[in-house]
Amino acid sequence: MKFIIQIIATIFVCFLFQTFLPWWTLAIGAFGVAFAVGNKTGFSFVAGFVGVGILWLGMAFYIDQTTHSILTEKVNKLLPLNSFVLTTLIGGLVGGFAALTGAFLKQK
């Protein structure tokens, strides 16, 4: 149950941070949620990865739909990987490692 709570809280907090602050503040949000929830380290990493990955996938899809695929076309020209996969992976890794750090700090 704490795992699902951590995912939902990570999505909510990181969305609020990214609405008003730079992109990297999602790491602070994932860190804080993981520290507050207190899951084990493996569960915290996965919850941070999934939470931020879902958030960034949704935001990338929204931006893609509102700009008529301008972002997708530019990223696909630069890198041969699908832009949605790349966005989800990068955001998920940042959120996962931030949540892992919060869980490790909570253990000490």
Image (tube, rainbow, N blue to C red):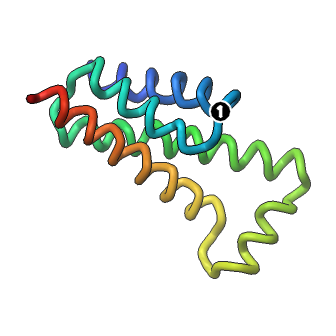
Q: Quadrant of the C terminus?
A: top left
The residue identified by callout 1 is: 21
Q: Is residue 35 or residue 8 the one in the foreground?
A: 35
What type is the residue that disc 1 sits on?
Answer: Leu
Seen at 22% across and 33% down, the residue is 103
Residue 23, how many percent across, how many down?
A: 61, 43
32, above or below 74, in the image: above
Q: Secondary structure at mark 1?
A: loop
Instruction: Give coordinates of residue 97: x percent, y percent.
Output: 33, 48
Q: Is residue 5 above or below residue 102?
A: above
Which image quadrant: the N terminus? Answer: top left
Crowd tier of the residue under label 1, counting other residues whose Cα lies within 10 Å: few below 14, some 14–19, many 20 or above? few
The residue that appears at 17% across and 36% down in the rendered structure is 104
User: What residue is shown at x 84% (from left), y 48% (from top)?
Assistant: 65
Considering depth in this image, is 97 or 47 the residue closer to the camera?
97
**Residue 79 sits in quarter:** bottom right
Measuring 31% from the left and 43% from the top, which residue is drawn there? 46
8 is higher (above) or lower (below) than 97: above
* Coordinates of residue 9 in the picture (x, y in percent): 44, 21
